Structures are given as structure tokens and as C-alpha cells.
């Protein structure tokens, strides 16, 4: 068995590349054998970080008690025990424990939900094993693997570099240094700190430029990032601006309420009421009025929202995004791959001496090139056509391989399309590799917008092939090629006319060119300028995604503007934009579509307006994207922006919601994004917005439901003390109400399905307070109804000669019944409960049933009667309870109806 020897951990930087290869018993070019890789996998395990340890169970349990309210309860429990009211004391301690358990379960569930999302977006690694390059899940890497990395990749393990070309890596994840550092292969002194080890690439860091190859020296927990992970442990994954605001709100509230409770106690004493009774009352007030379940309910609702989004293929990486999504006012989407399928097929090739059409579809190179008259086109009869196909296929990094009946593709779909069309004429990769071996490459980038390759063409001659955006190739060319191979001065007008005609059909047009051997072997931008001969235009179809059309329409009706940002030609972009419904027919086209050049010429005081008006931005460079986001934000928009490349990262970070592509996107973009689309589809963003709105709705509903109970409980006690009457409800009973209804009733609102009209209303203004005036009014209305109802019933029962315990049991049950009825009303803040249908949220029925059983238990079980000082009720009392609850519900319903009529609905 081959097993690598060990070195001092993390000291591979002091060895030469050759020594590392020997030490890890691998091969600098062929990598490990498949067998060795398997053996090492068994020995070292998967290349993953151990699940974050989080805090220990004991610590997490303890944390549940770290809350001002719990301190109050613990204090109250201790005092009641000292006063020998052991039953009360036991109830209070019982509630504290139940509260801790419920909190722990909720917290763990929410965290598990969020953590599981991490595994939905996985990283691939390019590895060479047995001499064959292959893409595997980065989990499968083992020490000794030979790995290739390129711009946009996340480094999958700790690697000692063997080779690199202009490799630059952003190591901020490890060192905090935000500027990317350049790498090389030299040997370094052992004492070199991690941040200066230029010959190493560390797991979790991001390649911002260049390419490199190296040997994996550490995987999983053994990597530098694994070490940090072990030290730091899990970060708090559940905090968002909203949860923090609410936690703060409930702390302030607690302090305020404690003050009120103390005041109540003092007032009571001054009125010479019994000190013990007054103390109990003060506790009841504190316990009742503090909305203790609020933060937990908010976290749970957010977590459920995240899970729902994941089901619709939008993986949220940062929880605050869930909140922000609901307020999105503009979505800026890439064209290629997001609004279109990103499945390219070359349909037409234009050459200065005539065009041909390509038949066949898909990746199989079956089909032929035809002339306009239907006759088969021959590449021997048209030199420009042949050179165009050659450039398309040889100045190309994609691969097309046959696997039995199937054709497998790898690489950029634009390049695949050009490979396929060349293969239709017999120009295959094997053929080209032999005839025109590649010497060097000027790689494609979104800034350069073209790619060039230098090939040796026998007899020590060289030829340069180029392909790219038409404007760029025109900048390089002074001549064009005829069918006979002769060069003539380029006819720019004819070329641009041809481009316009093709782009107007929605085709993506790339130009091809060639530079003859006479012009030397330099492959730099300067050397290319003015020396290239245009050979042709290849026009490819990339159909709009079927789901994009309804999704764009849904966004528009939801008051969300959709803008296309693309590196492609303005005409092509305009045609696709028209096809998916992005263009506003009432606006002139030159306001609708702006190109990168036009953008850079707009005076800065008109920039923001022009950007807000336009719907398509074509030939835009990644740098301009950042400026676009800023302009829209200056106009007060909440911007969701998609991106996939390394250079999109700044714009993704700047956007309120950065959206990366799970399939086509680079790791750098995913890292900068708040949300990743696992299917790259525009419709998924729209779905996520819809879910985001749903989450916010459910949060508001929960708060609207829970606050009246707290306010009413506090008020009932205060009024009783002010009037010097018996308490209609005792502290332990208030604890019962709060605990049971929060879990059995309130939480069920988190499972509430989205309301029907959720995507036909305007986006929520993020500056708007959580509770609008209309909602506050409703909360106060219900509070007053609760206070009045329980008071009336309590006094009514007493006047009928009932014992205090019976009257209290009636008041307690009234509270719960009104809450249960009100729960159905809160399912929609605007529509009546009947309209939604009683059974559309099954969880609600389950919750209400559980609550009914609980109420029967506290009312009729002798042990509960003792503990909670309750007493059995007869049927008449129940009828009165239900009667009052119905009246209260009717009042709320009438309020809703009246507000709907005058257009003063909450929200
Ligand atoms: P989007 O921004 O919507 O994804 P895009 O794919 O057209 O659109 P870029 O990838 O920035 O955006 O490409 C810009 C232009 O560069 C393209 O319109 C095309 O003309 C040219 N181009 C794209 N891919 C290649 C390639 N592999 N080689 C040469 N030129 C290319």
C-alpha cells in the first residue's frame, strides 16, 4: 500500500515542489493513481470540515436561562418558595424549565435547518489522476492529489504550488487581507508566516486571476482553515437585523415592565394592601406583559422561510436576505443563462462573400451547412468560412466528446456551439490539434471580450486565431477575407449591417478573425491591433427560458422592475428582452437600452435617472455593474443583482441581495452572494421574492396576534390593583396562557401558506416600521376587548355566586378562547377569516385541538386544579365564554371590514 510520509504539519512551503511530490508519493504530471487515491480516501477521510462544534449542550441549556425575563421568574420562584407558597414556586420553576426546553428545541431546529443549506451548494475540484484530468467533488480530494485551479475557483484544499501563470489569490478568508496576493513556486524559509507563503494555496481562499497546479498537502480539518474553524467554532447563524431589533425591543420592554410592576407593588402597599398579594400581582404583571416567545418565533419563522426557499431552489447564504427579499424593488439579471437557457447553437455564419445556415440542433454534430439556395456549403469553396470555423473551433477551450450514442460537453456553451458547428463540417478537435497545435493563449475575459490563440502551422510558421465580440474584433481588423482567400480592406458598414440583421433576430453574434504568419508571433493586445483579418460572423441561438416570461410578468405586477445586464450586443439583448417582456412599449428604444459606452458618456447628474429608466444594459463591463447598483440604490431602490464571474463580486456585495449562479457561477461569486440559485433560473429569484414576502407577512401576523395577549394581561392586573379588587387571573395562570398558546397556537402561523395576492401588491418599504399605525390600532382594539371581556366575565361569575377559583378559571379560558378565535383572524391582516378557508393550514387545526385538550386538563384535572388554583366549570360558563369570544371576534371582523371599505388596511 502506498501511503505518504508525513512532514511537520503545515511546513510544505520549505520544500521544493519536487520534494513534496516525492514525500507525498505522487506524480507532478499524472497525479495519483485511482487506486492510491481510493486508499488514501479510506485513510484520511473526506475533505470536509468537521460539522461546527457549536456550543456544548450544557452551555446551550444555560443560555436559555440568560434572559431578563427568566431572571425575574427565577427571583419570583425563589421568593414564593421563601414565602412557603411551594405550589406556586413549583409552577414558576416548571415554566422556566419548559421554556428552556422549548427554546432549546426551537433554536436547534432553526440552526439545523440553516446548517443543512451549506451542503446544498458544493464545490468541485479539477484533479489529475492516472494522467486524466477530471472534475470531482472537492470532498473526494486526498493528500497527494494533483489539482488544477483557475480564476473564479475556490481553493479546495491546502496545496503546494508546482506551476502557475499570473496566479493571484484572495486570502481574506484566512488572513483578513483583502487585496489578492500573487503566487509563485519558490522555496521559502520555514519561519515564513502563513500570509507570506507565496508557494502555497490555502483551502477556502479564492482565485481572482490566472491559473495554477499543485499537490494537495492537507485536507479537511488538517488545513489552515480547518484549524481556524476549530478555534472559532460556529458563528451565530440566526441573527438578522430584525431579530436583533426585536431582541433589543423585548429587553427594553422588560425593563419598562419591571418598572411598572415595581410601581404597582408600591402603589398597592401605599393603599395598604397585603404585601404578599401585591408582590404576586407585580410578578403577574411582569410575567404577563413581556412577550417572551417573540424572538424565538421570529427565528423559527425565518428558518421555515429559508427552508421553503431552498425547496424552490434558492439557497439563502445569509439570513438577513430573507427579510430584504420581500422589499426588493429592482432585480438586475444577467441575460445569458439566467433569462436564457445558455444552450447555444450556431444557426448562421456570415462571411464577406455570403452566408450559410446550419441545420441540426443540440450538441450532436449532425446536420450540415447550407447556402441560401439550399445547396450544401463546402468549406473548400469559401476560405473565409473555413477560417471562421477554424477560429471558432481551435481558439476554444471547450470539449466535445463522444460517449457511445451520447455527446458530452465541457466548458463555455458559446464555445461548445462553435465546436459543434465546426464538427458538422468535419473540423474536429483531434484534427485541429494535429494540424494547428496551440502555442499560447490570450484568454477570454469579460473586459477584453475576445480570445486569441497562437498556433504553429508547420514550417516554423505561426498563425493567430481570434474570436469575440464584433466591436472588439473590428477594432483589431483592417482587412477581411474573400471566398478565394484574398484579403481586401474591411467593409465595416456591411459587417455592422449583417450584425444588426442577425442580432435583431435575437441571435448572439461573435466575430472570428485570423492573423497571417507574416505578422509575427506576438500575442499581445497591442500586437494584434490592426493586424487581424475578419473572416466571418457566427450567429447562435440561445432561447429565452420558458419560465422567464411569466416570472418577469409576475415581478412587474408585484411592482418590481426587472433590468437585464449583459455583456452581449445591444440588438441581441434588445431582442431577448422583448421576447421575455422586459421592454416598456411606451418608451423610445434609446431610453430603454443603454450600452456600456453610452453609460460612460452620461453626465453624472443625469446618470441615476437614466439608469432607473432603462431596462436593458448591453456591452456592460463588470466594473460598470457596481456603478449601476449604486445608482439604483441612490434612487432609493432595494436591488437584487445576479452575477457569476470573479469581477461581479463587488457588485454582488454592494447589492442588497447578491444572487450567484449555483451551476454556471464561480466560487468567488457564490462567496460574495447572499443567495445562490441552484438552477440559475430567473424564475427562481421571483419565487424567492415571493417567499420573502410570505415570511414577512407571517412575522407580522405573529406579532399582531401575540401582543394583545401580553398587553391585556398586564392591563387586567394593573386595573385590578388600581381598583383594589381581586385579581381576575393569577401569575401561574398567566404563565400557563403564555406558554401553551405561544407553542400550540402562535407558532402555527409560521406554517401559514402565502396569501393569494402576495405578488400583486407593491414591495414593502424597508423603512416602514414593523407595525404600521393601522396594526397598532388593531392590537389595541383586541387588547381592550380581552381586558373588558375577561373583566366582565370574572365579575359576572362572582356575582352569580361562583368561587374566585371558578371565576378565574372562566377568565383564563376566555383569554385562551379569544386568542384561538383571533388566531384565525390573524391568518390574513386584510381579508376576512372566512375567505381564507378554515382548513387551508392544517397545522392550525392541530394546534387548536392540542390547546383544547390542554384547557380541558387545566379545568377538570384535580391535580391541575390544585397546582393552578383552577376549578371545574359547568356548561353554562363555557357558553358564556364562547359567546363573549364570538362577540369579540365579530368586533374585529367589523373593524377589518370597515377599514377595507375606507382603504385603511394594515400594511
Ligand atoms: P451575460 O453578461 O448576460 O452573461 P455574455 O455572456 O454575453 O452575457 P460576457 O461573458 O461578458 O457576457 O461576454 C461578453 C461578450 O464577449 C459576448 O457577448 C461575446 O461577444 C464575447 N464572448 C463571450 N464568450 C466568449 C468566448 N468564450 N470567447 C470569445 N468571446 C466571447
Image (cartoon, helix red, strand yellow):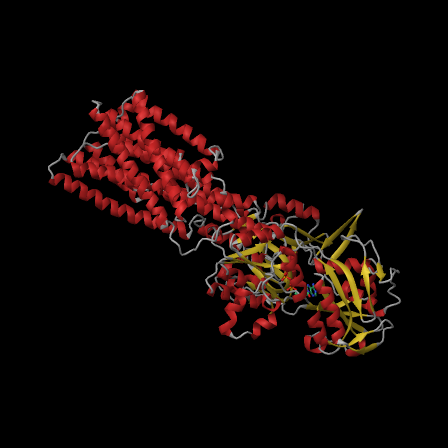
Give the mark count: 0
Horizontal and vertical percent position of residue 679: 62, 50
Q: Is residue 804 at all visible to an observer of this figure?
A: no
Please tell me which residue is depicted at 33% across the width and 49% down the height of the picture: 249
Apparent side of residue 65 relative to residue 319 in the rendered image (left or right)? left
Q: Quadrant holding ligand 1?
A: bottom right
Report the front residue among 589 and 489.
589
Report the front residue among 832 and 404.
832
Horizontal and vertical percent position of residue 402: 79, 51
Q: Is residue 470 at all visible to an observer of this figure?
A: yes
Apparent side of residue 12 relative to residue 389 in the rendered image (left or right)? left
Q: Residue 593 occupies which quadrant of the picture?
A: bottom right
Specify the farthest residue to the front: 901
Vertical placement of residue 75 versus 317, above or below: above
Horizontal and vertical percent position of residue 330: 52, 58
Apparent side of residue 788 relative to residue 391 in the rendered image (left or right)? left
Report the front residue among 130 and 851.
851
Quadrant of the rendering where the N terminus is positioned: top right
Horizontal and vertical percent position of residue 503: 71, 64
Q: Residue 643 occupies which quadrant of the picture?
A: bottom right
Report the front residue among 748 and 531.
748
Vertical placement of residue 690 versus 540, above or below: above
Amino acid at each position: 500500500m502506498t501511503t505518504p510520509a508525513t512532514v511537520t504539519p503545515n511546513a510544505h512551503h520549505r520544500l521544493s515542489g519536487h520534494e513534496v511530490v516525492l514525500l507525498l508519493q505522487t506524480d507532478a504530471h499524472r497525479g495519483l493513481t485511482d487506486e492510491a487515491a481510493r486508499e488514501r480516501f479510506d485513510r484520511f477521510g473526506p475533505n470536509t470540515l468537521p460539522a461546527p462544534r457549536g456550543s456544548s449542550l450544557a452551555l446551550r441549556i444555560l443560555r436559555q436561562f440568560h434572559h431578563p425575563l427568566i431572571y425575574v421568574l427565577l427571583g419570583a420562584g425563589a421568593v414564593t418558595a421563601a414565602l412557603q407558597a411551594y405550589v406556586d414556586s413549583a409552577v414558576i420553576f416548571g415554566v422556566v424549565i419548559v421554556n428552556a426546553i422549548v427554546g432549546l428545541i426551537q433554536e436547534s431546529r432553526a440552526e439545523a435547518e440553516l446548517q443543512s443549506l451549506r451542503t446544498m451548494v458544493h464545490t468541485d475540484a479539477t484533479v489529475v489522476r492516472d494522467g486524466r484530468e477530471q472534475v470531482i467533488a472537492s470532498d473526494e480530494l486526498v493528500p497527494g492529489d494533483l489539482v488544477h485551479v483557475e480564476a473564479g475557483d475556490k481553493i479546495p484544499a491546502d496545496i503546494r504550488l508546482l506551476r502557475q501563470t499570473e496566479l493571484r489569490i484572495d486570502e481574506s478568508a484566512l488572513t483578513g487581507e483583502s487585496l489578492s496576493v500573487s503566487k509563485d513556486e519558490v522555496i521559502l524559509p520555514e519561519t515564513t508566516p502563513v500570509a507570506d507563503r507565496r508557494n502555497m494555496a490555502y483551502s477556502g481562499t479564492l482565485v481572482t486571476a490566472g491559473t495554477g497546479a499543485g499537490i494537495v498537502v492537507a485536507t479537511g480539518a488538517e488545513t489552515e482553515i480547518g484549524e481556524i474553524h476549530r478555534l472559532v467554532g460556529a458563528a451565530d447563524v440566526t441573527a438578522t437585523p430584525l431579530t436583533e431589533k426585536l431582541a433589543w425591543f423585548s429587553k427594553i420592554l422588560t425593563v419598562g415592565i419591571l418598572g411598572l410592576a415595581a410601581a404597582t407593588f408600591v402603589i398597592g402597599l401605599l393603599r395598604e394592601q397585603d404585601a404578599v398579594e401585591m408582590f404576586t400581582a407585580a410578578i403577574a404583571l411582569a410575567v404577563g406583559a413581556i412577550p417572551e416567545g417573540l424572538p424565538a418565533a421570529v427565528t423559527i419563522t425565518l428558518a421555515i422561510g429559508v427552508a421553503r426557499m431552498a425547496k424552490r431552489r434558492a439557497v439563502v447564504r445569509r439570513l438577513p436576505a430573507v427579510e430584504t427579499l420581500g422589499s426588493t424593488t429592482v432585480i438586475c439579471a444577467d441575460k445569458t443563462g439566467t433569462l436564457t437557457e445558455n444552450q447555444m447553437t450556431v444557426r448562421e455564419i456570415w462571411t464577406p462573400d455570403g452566408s450559410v445556415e446550419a441545420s441540426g440542433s443540440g450538441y450532436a454534430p449532425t446536420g450540415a451547412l447550407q447556402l441560401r439556395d439550399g445547396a450544401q456549403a463546402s468549406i473548400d469553396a469559401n476560405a473565409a468560412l473555413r477560417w471562421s470555423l477554424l477560429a471558432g473551433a481551435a481558439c476554444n477551450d471547450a470539449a466535445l466528446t463522444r460517449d457511445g450514442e451520447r455527446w458530452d460537453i465541457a466548458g463555455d456553451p458559446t464555445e461548445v456551439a462553435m465546436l459543434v458547428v465546426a464538427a458538422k463540417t468535419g473540423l474536429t478537435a483531434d484534427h485541429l490539434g494535429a494540424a494547428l497545435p496551440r502555442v499560447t493563449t490570450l484568454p477570454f475575459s469579460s473586459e477584453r471580450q475576445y480570445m486569441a490563440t497562437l498556433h504553429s502551422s508547420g514550417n516554423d510558421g505561426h498563425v493567430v486565431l481570434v474570436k469575440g465580440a464584433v466591436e472588439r474584433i473590428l477594432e483589431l481588423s483592417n482587412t477581411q477575407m474573400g471566398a478565394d482567400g484574398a484579403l481586401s480592406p474591411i467593409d465595416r458598414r456591411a459587417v455592422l449591417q449583417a450584425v444588426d440583421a442577425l442580432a435583431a433576430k435575437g441571435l448572439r453574434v461573435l466575430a472570428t478573425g485570423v492573423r497571417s504568419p507574416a505578422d509575427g508571433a506576438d500575442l499581445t493586445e497591442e500586437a494584434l491591433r490592426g493586424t487581424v483579418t475578419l473572416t466571418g460572423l457566427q450567429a447562435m441561438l440561445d432561447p429565452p427560458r420558458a419560465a422567464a416570461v411569466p416570472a418577469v410578468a409576475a415581478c412587474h405586477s408585484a411592482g418590481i422592475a426587472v433590468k437585464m445586464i449583459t455583456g452581449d450586443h445591444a440588438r441581441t439583448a434588445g431582442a431577448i428582452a422583448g421576447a421575455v417582456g422586459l421592454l416598456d412599449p411606451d418608451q423610445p428604444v434609446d431610453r430603454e437600452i443603454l450600452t456600456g459606452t453610452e453609460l460612460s458618456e452620461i453626465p453624472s447628474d443625469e446618470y441615476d435617472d437614466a439608469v432607473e429608466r432603462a431596462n436593458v444594459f448591453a456591452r456592460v463591463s463588470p466594473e460598470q455593474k457596481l456603478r449601476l447598483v449604486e445608482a439604483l440604490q441612490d434612487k432609493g431602490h432595494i436591488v437584487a443583482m445576479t452575477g457569476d464571474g470573479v469581477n461581479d463580486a463587488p457588485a454582488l456585495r454592494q447589492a442588497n441581495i447578491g444572487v450567484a449562479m449555483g451551476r454556471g457561477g464561480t466560487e468567488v461569486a457564490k462567496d460574495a452572494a447572499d443567495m445562490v440559485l441552484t438552477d440559475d433560473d430567473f424564475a427562481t429569484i421571483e419565487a424567492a421574492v415571493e417567499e420573502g414576502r410570505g415570511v414577512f407577512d407571517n412575522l407580522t401576523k405573529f406579532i399582531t396576534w401575540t401582543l394583545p395577549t401580553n398587553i391585556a394581561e398586564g392591563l387586567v392586573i394593573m386595573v385590578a390593583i388600581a381598583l383594589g379588587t381581586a385579581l381576575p387571573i393569577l401569575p401561574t395562570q398567566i404563565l400557563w396562557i403564555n406558554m401553551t398558546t405561544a407553542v400550540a397556537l402562535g407558532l402555527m402561523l409560521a406554517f401559514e401558506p402565502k396569501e393569494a395576492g402576495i405578488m400583486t401588491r407593491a414591495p414593502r418599504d424597508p423603512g416602514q416600521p414593523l407595525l404600521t399605525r393601522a396594526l397598532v390600532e388593531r392590537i389595541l382594539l383586541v387588547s381592550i376587548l380581552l381586558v373588558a371581556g375577561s373583566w366582565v366575565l370574572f365579575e359576572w361569575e362572582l356575582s352569580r355566586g361562583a368561587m374566585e377559583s371558578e371565576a378565574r378559571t372562566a377568565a383564563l379560558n376566555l383569554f385562551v378562547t379569544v386568542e384561538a378565535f383571533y388566531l384565525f383572524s390573524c391568518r390574513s391582516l386584510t381579508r376576512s377569516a372566512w375567505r381564507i378557508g378554515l382548513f387551508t393550514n392544517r397545522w392550525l387545526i392541530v394546534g387548536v385541538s392540542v390547546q383544547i385538550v390542554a384547557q380541558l386538563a387545566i379545568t377538570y384535572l384535580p391535580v391541575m386544579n390544585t397546582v393552578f388554583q383552577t376549578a371545574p366549570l359547568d356548561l353554562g360558563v363555557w357558553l358564556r365564554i364562547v359567546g363573549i369570544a364570538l362577540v369579540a371576534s365579530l368586533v374585529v371582523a367589523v373593524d377589518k371590514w370597515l377599514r377595507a371599505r375606507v382603504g385603511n388596511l394594515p400594511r
